[in-house]
Amino acid sequence: MDKIVMKGGTALHGEVEVSGAKNAALPILASALLADGTNTFRNVPDLADVATMLEVLRTMGCEAARLTGKKADTCEISIAGDITPEAPYELVKTMRASVLVLGPLVARFGRARVSMPGGCAIGARPIDQHLKGLKALGADIHLTEGYVEARAKQLKGGMVNFDVITVTGTENVMMAAVLAKGRTVMENCAREPEVEELARVLNKMGAKVEGAGTSVITIEGVESLNPVDHAILPDRIEAGTLLVAAAISGGNVLVKHARPEHLDAVMDKLREAGCTLTVEDGGIRCKAPRTLKSVNITTTEHPGFPTDMQAQLMALMTVSHGTSVISENIFENRFMHVPELHRLGADITIQGHTAVVKGVKALSGAPVMATDLRASASLILAGLRADGHTEVSRVYHLDRGYERLERKLRGLGADIRRVKERA
Ligand SMILES: CC(=O)N[C@H]1[C@@H](OP(=O)(O)OP(=O)(O)OC[C@H]2O[C@@H](n3ccc(=O)[nH]c3=O)[C@H](O)[C@@H]2O)O[C@H](CO)[C@@H](O)[C@@H]1O
Ligand SMILES: C=C(OP(=O)(O)O)C(=O)O
């Protein structure tokens, strides 16, 4: 097992590039099941979760591989022969997003058997809304032995009104509806840029999806789809994490490929905290102030402040002047980083789904443990600022969603490296 070993105190300077978005790549790779022929996806981040999705597709009988050399950012996926429309527990348990194959499988092959994902460190994470949507399109759904079994000879367009706004739920039902007979209207949809990006890919394949990026998506089903060549959009959460790295270290960094239109809520909070943010050619620059100010944060669905940036902003608030109130409204257990931030000297009190962070003068390096993906980013950010050495273990969480983060930070001057931990 690897760990990250770092020494805080260096202000980061320079330029860094954002990779492709994990949360766009995962549904888009699953969408390859909808078309025959070879799908080519570029700017696909090299992440453990992407490797898992490729493995899920291979297990079902697809050819799915990352190219090498200069094309190492490219994945090619094609359906080679018969498909076994099943996603096994062994893979789904390592990555919840594997459930994204459910919609495409039932739409294209008339049946799917996918392990129920269950919860994870950040919360319960049910998929009832995915199933409600598929049922509205005529799928027969059964839960047996920990698996969802879905069947439909031919899905039919229908009316889906989500009770809860769900990102992967919207994506799953959208991928089913593109091959359903007739018109589907989905209401109360997630408006995240990754949903819009998936719709862009589906439309390139020949689907008729309108309204993605708003809360109502309308889909006219088509008989078949064609393979595509598509470059995945940049990762707004990685971009946000790098902007916070500049801010917390007292630095000045240009985050290249960061898209301001996807980062409004995060940029607003960083400005409120005193950072100077400028949109430059092809990216966003963050210049830290002399003294950071505390700001309050409430996570909500896009375009609100993203839950996937809550842990990182909390790290920033631990060293900001004043008191910050952070409310987590999406996941019930997304404060796992708090006890670890305490180990670095942070002053944080949790009251239900709210954390009250009192800024301290200094953090002090310590061994800490990553508990989930964004928690690990938060600990690394705190480690950039902490006096002395910080060691972050269980970085397999980090590797799910960040492409070589320690290398990117080292390129900006951070004293950080990855070492092999003895088993
Ligand atoms: C691979 C991917 O894109 N993951 C993102 C996606 O996760 P994911 O799509 O799993 O998260 P959801 O948007 O579905 O969850 C939002 C809320 O809805 C609830 N819910 C969800 C589905 C359902 O059927 N029933 C239900 O009650 C959840 O418990 C949660 O409280 O969106 C989250 C919220 O922006 C992000 O943190 C994740 O990074
Ligand atoms: C929670 C996340 O991912 P997932 O939905 O795959 O667990 C995340 O990207 O922060």
Image (cartoon, rainbow, N blue to C red):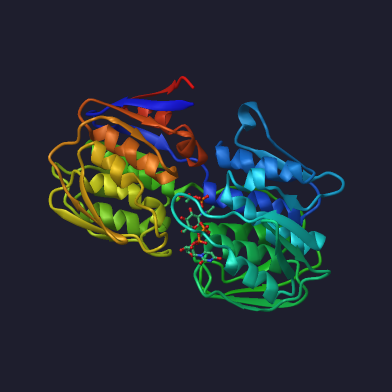
Residue 397 point in image, percent of width and height: 47, 39
Q: Is residue 19 above or below residue 228?
A: above
Image position of 291 with respect to 269: above or below: above
Q: Position of residue 166 (x, y in %)?
A: 52, 65
| Image quadrant where residue 186 sits | bottom right
Which residue lies at the image location 63% right of the left edge and 48% below the top edge?
92
Seen from the viewer's position, the closer of residues 339 and 202 is: 339
Q: Is residue 44 visible?
A: no
Image side of residue 20 versus residue 370, left or right:
right
Query: In front: 233, or 247?
Result: 247
Residue 207 in percent (x, y) is at 71, 65
Residue 28 in sight: yes
For image coordinates 43% across by 63% down, the residue present is 302
**Vertically, is 290 above or below 407?**
below
Residue 77 is left or right of residue 80, and the answer is: left
Q: In this orientation, which residue lies closer to the viewer: 390 or 287?
A: 390
Q: Residue at x 24, y 36 (%)?
A: 344
Exactly how many numbered labels are in the figure?
Answer: 0
Residue depicted at x 28% and y 49% = 314
Q: Residue furthest right?
A: 81
Residue 404, position as x, y percentages in the image: 47, 32
